[in-house]
Amino acid sequence: MAYGCICASGPNAATFHYVLNNRDMEDSDLYLTNMGIRILGYYSDISTTFLVNGKFIVKQKLIYQIVLDSNIGVIESIKSGITKYAEIDKLSKIIILKRLQNIGILKKEYDPEDMFNDGLPRTFMPHTVGYFLGLDVHDLGRKIVTYKSNAILQNGNFITIEPRIYFIDMLMDEAEQSPFLNKYINIEELEKYRRFGGVRIEDDVMIGEDSVEIYQKDLPRIIKEIEDYKKK
């Protein structure tokens, strides 16, 4: 194994590296798994969000689809030698902000660019969209994307793409109480997602000259695929 498996259900899925394993799964829960293997010294790191009972309820379907849209949109945007890492990180968050506007958690009259610039993405996704993989789960390439905002993704880069939405009480409280952020939020709608947990969809991708190869493309990702898989 590349690291200890992280498996969290219900509200525990909002904990980045949940390890307590002291809660029974409930019928209506989502469960988030984060795991990888190491082969010949090289690491993988993959996250999926599945269902306990095999059927998404409406709120779960809405949030899952937003994260999937962000994942797909980022991967489709990458062009070797052209795309800056900072650009895909921003894109992942702008997609999430726009979709949260569509479902009513965020107010539609505001520009997502303003929300982004004011730091609102941190409320739902308090990290970057991914990092480099290689001889460690977080390889040295992380220094490139962390400290060099103009770094351009190159042919041969092996990275994770892992947009997420978490509903973390502390961050929700901060945003609702912030005079800079609460103007963007429909607080009554956001409150409906207390103890929802989180959704993460993480793919490992290799950037080629003309395409991006997804290493776990056979995993069920779309909602119907997941529900059909759970019926087996």
Image: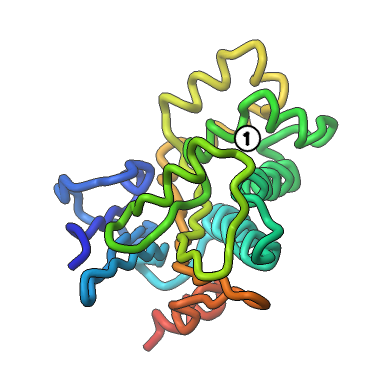
Residue lying farthest bottom?
232
Q: Residue at x 56, y 78 (%)?
A: 224
- Please tell me whether residue 196 is drawn above or below residue 226 in the rendered image: above
Position of the N terminus by quadrant? bottom left
The residue that disc 1 covers is 189
Classify mark 1: helix, strand or loop. Answer: helix
The picture places residue 43, in percent across and down from the top left corner, at 29, 66
- Please tell me whether residue 59 is drawn above or below residue 127 in the rendered image: below
Q: Is residue 217 left or right of residue 30?
A: right
Residue lying farthest top?
179
Residue closer to the observer: 229 or 118: 118
Q: Which class describes the residues within 10 Å of circle 1: few (<14), some (14-19), or many (20+)?
A: few
The picture places residue 192, in percent across and down from the top left corner, at 54, 37
Q: Residue at x 62, y 65 (%)?
A: 75
Q: Residue at x 50, y 64 (%)?
A: 157
The picture places residue 60, in percent across and down from the top left corner, at 52, 56
- Please tell me whether residue 213 is drawn above or below residue 98 in the rendered image: below
